[in-house]
Image (spheres, helix red, strand yellow):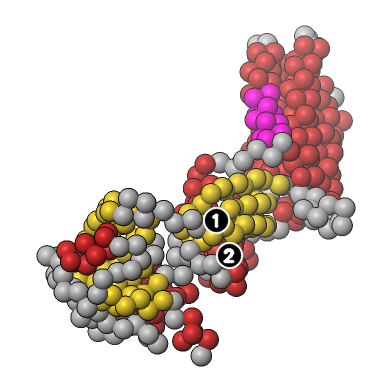
Amino acid sequence: MYQAKKMELHTPSVVRVALYSLLFNLSLLGAKIFLAALTGSLALQADAVHTLVDVLASAALILGLKISERKSESFPLGLYKVENLASIAISFLLFFTAYEIIREAAVAAPQAPPYQGYALLAVAAIIPLPYLFGSFQIRVGRQTGSPSLIADGVQHRADVLTSSLVFLALAARNTGLPLDRIAAAIIALVIVKEGWSILVDGMRVLLDASVDLKTLEKIRSLIMLAPEVAGIEELVARNSGRYLFVQASLLFRVSDLRRAHMAGKRIEAEIKKELPQVDRVTIHYQPIQRSSLRYAIALQDARGALSEHFGESPFFALVDIDLTRKDISRQEIVANPYSNLAKGKGLKVSRFLLAYKPDIIICKESLAGKGPGYAFAEAGVEIAQTEAESLEDLVKSLAGTDMEMKGMQVAGTQDADMQK
């Protein structure tokens, strides 16, 4: 949490970086116009026109960002996609840049006078500036999840190629080598490829395409960490501008709507904590239709003797009973990693068991009024006491009856104790 807040403090806002982009482009435009007027270079004049396109793109970026932040009753989900429209506009400006380079290479004067060395030095000094600033924009764009800022950064990196083309054109005219036309064709293809990538990404968002599988799997794992959740029926996430909207239909163990709502709020907070670009999480609650039950049984040893104490039990048996066939579908014994803990072991053991998604906890000790009992109750897990001595006898009774367990006393979910 501290690192996330620290990152936010050191990450400039998207609008501020967009304003920096406008000022940067205006500075470049002034420098190129000055050099073009001083030297009479047609290549520099063309590059100045290209930079003017960048100025217009930066202005469009700021306008798109400001509009995307506005709230409106007509657009309850926000105007975030305006930012994606801005990135698409920038992609077309990249296409225009490629056309401009090809046109300049095709119509450039075949016999232009040589230029002085200071012009080459000035152009060489300009070359790395767009790359450095573009890298800064892309880094901030990735940190904030801003597609239009990333697109603008990619365009600034492309400016390095156009500036290099100008440098090569000037150097070639001094040496008599016609390299500018070949360089123009290669650069134009690279810019078209970058513009196409930005265009496709923007169109995917506008058409509500789902987010990448890695992000979906992270959201899925965060949801399944909640002990109240038995499963996920549907999980959908989509981009809108630099934000994510998540919609999930979940199967809950708890039937109490208040508990389900509290669990949903906790899941939403956890997702937003791990994925700051998430704007909204919508959760639909579905009660689980059980076809099987999973029992977690406290054991004294791995051979199957039942333990007298819950937290100090060295092992737990996990037994799945198929309610239709009334037989065992799965059985596993897991070691208790907290059995030798000096204090606080009860709650740690309960959290450990909740990760296995049990439906009923069985032990010889009463958990009524104790921390683990409350933890299981909040997760919708029932607690049962038994007088059985061995796992074998207990499992036979579980498989041979349907919730009426021989030698067992069901303690329920302690709702009455919690209300007190």
C-alpha separation, residue under disc 1 versus residue under disc 2? 9 Å
- Mark positioned earlier in the residue sequence (1 or 2): 1
Disc 1, disc 2: CB below 8 Å? yes
How crowded pointer 1 is (Cα within 10 Å; few <14, some 14-19, many 20+) is rated as many
Instruction: Please name whichever residue, 373 or 282, is drawn nearer the observer in this view of the structure.
Output: 373
**Which kind of residue does numbered mark 2 sit on?**
Gly
| Rendering coords of residue 121 (x, y %) | 68, 33
Q: Which residues are magenta?
A: 192-204
Q: Which residue in the structure is indicated by mark 1?
A: 250
**Which kind of residue does numbered mark 1 sit on?**
Leu
Q: What residue is shown at x 46% (from left), y 70% (from top)?
A: 379
How crowded pointer 2 is (Cα within 10 Å; few <14, some 14-19, many 20+) is rated as many
Q: Which residue in the structure is indicated by mark 2?
A: 264
| Rendering coords of residue 399 (x, y %) | 27, 59
Q: Is residue 141 visible?
A: no
Q: Tag 2, which secondary structure?
A: helix
